[in-house]
Image (cartoon, helix red, strand yellow):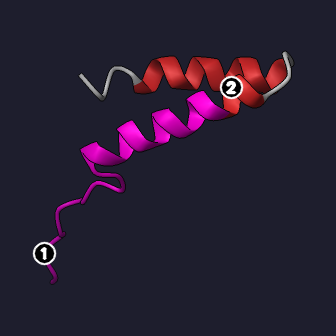
Amino acid sequence: MAHPTMARPVFSTEDFGLIREALAVAIRNGDDNADTRKLVNLHHRLGRFSR
């Protein structure tokens, strides 16, 4: 029977900063609509990882 392997993270800690920066650009360039508000919330949540 094979031993289960450890789960590896999909993103590195550096990736969260890059994704957050990309979201900031999309938010600045986007219209004020429901999708932009979702991006703002995601940007805020990702801020927890960059600390």
In the displayed structure, 21 sits above or below 45; it is below
Q: Residue at x 68, y 25 (%)?
A: 27
In the displayed structure, 1 sits above or below 17; it is below
Q: Can you tell which quarter of the image residue 30 is in?
A: top right
Question: Magenta segment, which residues?
Answer: 1-25
What mark, if any, has residue 26 been given in the picture?
Answer: none
Query: Which kind of residue does numbered mark 1 sit on?
Result: His
Where in the figure is residue 9, as x and y percent of width and height? Answer: 28, 54
Residue designated by label 2: 27
Count of labels in the image: 2
Secondary element type, mark 1: loop
Q: Is residue 7 magenta?
A: yes
Secondary element type, mark 2: helix
Query: Which kind of residue does numbered mark 2 sit on?
Result: Ile
N-terminal label among 1 and 2: 1
Contact between marks 1 and 2 (CB within 8 A): the answer is: no
* Label 2 environment density (alpha carbons within 10 Å; few <14, some 14–19, many ≥20): some
What mark, if any, has residue 3 been given in the picture?
Answer: 1
Where in the figure is residue 47, as x and y percent of width and height? Answer: 39, 21
Q: Residue at x 30, y 28 (%)?
A: 49
Q: Nearer the viewer, residue 23 or 7?
A: 23
Q: Is residue 35 magenta?
A: no
* Label 1 environment density (alpha carbons within 10 Å; few <14, some 14–19, many ≥20): few
